Amino acid sequence: MLIRLEHIEKTYGTPDRPVPVLHDVNFTMEEGAYCAIMGPSGSGKSTLMNLLGYLDTPTAGTYYFEDVDNSRASDAEMAKIRNEKIGFVFQSFHLLPQRKAWENVALPLLYGNVPKKERRARAEQALCEVGLEDRMDFFPTQLSGGQCQRVAIARAICMRPKLLLADEPTGALDSKSGQQIMDIFDKLHARGMSIIMITHELAVAERASRMLHIYDGCLSGGDAQ
Ligand SMILES: Nc1ncnc2c1ncn2[C@@H]1O[C@H](COP(=O)(O)OP(=O)(O)OP(=O)(O)O)[C@@H](O)[C@H]1O
Ligand SMILES: [Mg+2]
């Protein structure tokens, strides 16, 4: 199993003013699965995504990744897992404006001390996979929203992660650009990439092989079929 969450709770706030967000979340996901998570605003989708991506730790419960319990990992251990195993795509792209497309893509390789020539070659390969090999030296301001998101996807996959996490990847895009992003996800899934995607749109969620729902911090459909 790639992912197993058992009885996960997440509470923000302070002990005297707790803000409980996730309640007894149980979720299993096999390697190569493509899951969509839907739910209203404020239901805890991004909170769950942050836990899955080791950007935050649960208040209670256990998180197994590749059958290893990392739920109490240190910040440094979590950073290592994030860099090596997980790619992120966000609604608002999160590209560095002063860096060219290929430099944005190669950023995770920079942290991994890969030499420049190899960084550029691997960035080119990742940009090729999203159909942007002719935009290597463009800055984000010279790209459309859909193209920026494709650069962000190239950045997310250039370390060849086990898991791709996407938090409303089409939320800021027109429908045609959104469609292109979904086509790329389909292609990555067909090649064996494990994907978890948050979306508000049913038509987007229906592209996944599994659909889960979250209401008021309670997840349904969490058991692998
Ligand atoms: N750092 C925080 N401190 C306190 N409360 C928080 C924090 N982050 C999120 N929350 C609360 O947790 C709840 C869930 O937030 P979350 O961002 O996970 O929702 P969401 O489902 O992603 O919503 P949206 O669809 O609007 O993105 C909200 O009520 C929010 O106010
Ligand atoms: Mg959110």
Image: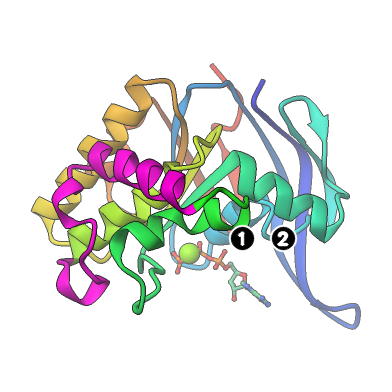
Q: Cβ of disc 1 within 8 Å of ligand 1?
A: yes
Residue 131 percent location from the top left of the image: 17, 42
Q: Which residue is mark 2?
A: 56
Q: Which residue is mark 1?
A: 47
Q: Which residue extends farthest left?
A: 176
For residue 11, which quarter of the picture? bottom right
Residue 27 percent location from the top left of the image: 65, 34
Residue 107 percent location from the top left of the image: 49, 59
**27 above or below 215?**
above
Q: Which residue extends farthest top?
A: 225
Ranked by sequence position, the earlier of labels 1 and 2 is 1
Colour pattern of the rendering = rainbow
**121 above or below 40?**
above
- Check residue 130 for magenta coloring: yes
Give left or right: position of 45 versus 34: right
For residue 26, which quarter of the picture? top right
Residue 35 percent location from the top left of the image: 45, 34
Residue at 81% across, 50% down: 77
Residue at 82% across, 41% down: 70
Quarter of the picture holding the N terminus:
top right
Residue in the foreground of this view, choosing between 200 and 89: 89
Magenta-drawn stretch, dominant element (helix, strand or loop): helix
The region drawn magenta spans 116-144
For the residues bearing labels 1 and 2, Cβ distance under 8 angstroms: yes
Element marked by disc 2: loop
Q: Nearer the viewer, mark 1 or mark 2?
A: 2
Residue at 61% across, 57% down: 111
For residue 167, which quarter of the picture? bottom left
Q: Cβ of disc 2 within 8 Å of ligand 1?
A: no
Residue at 56% across, 32% down: 162
Graded by Cα atoms within 10 Å as few (under 14), some (14 to 19) or many (20 or more), the crowding at tag 1 reads many
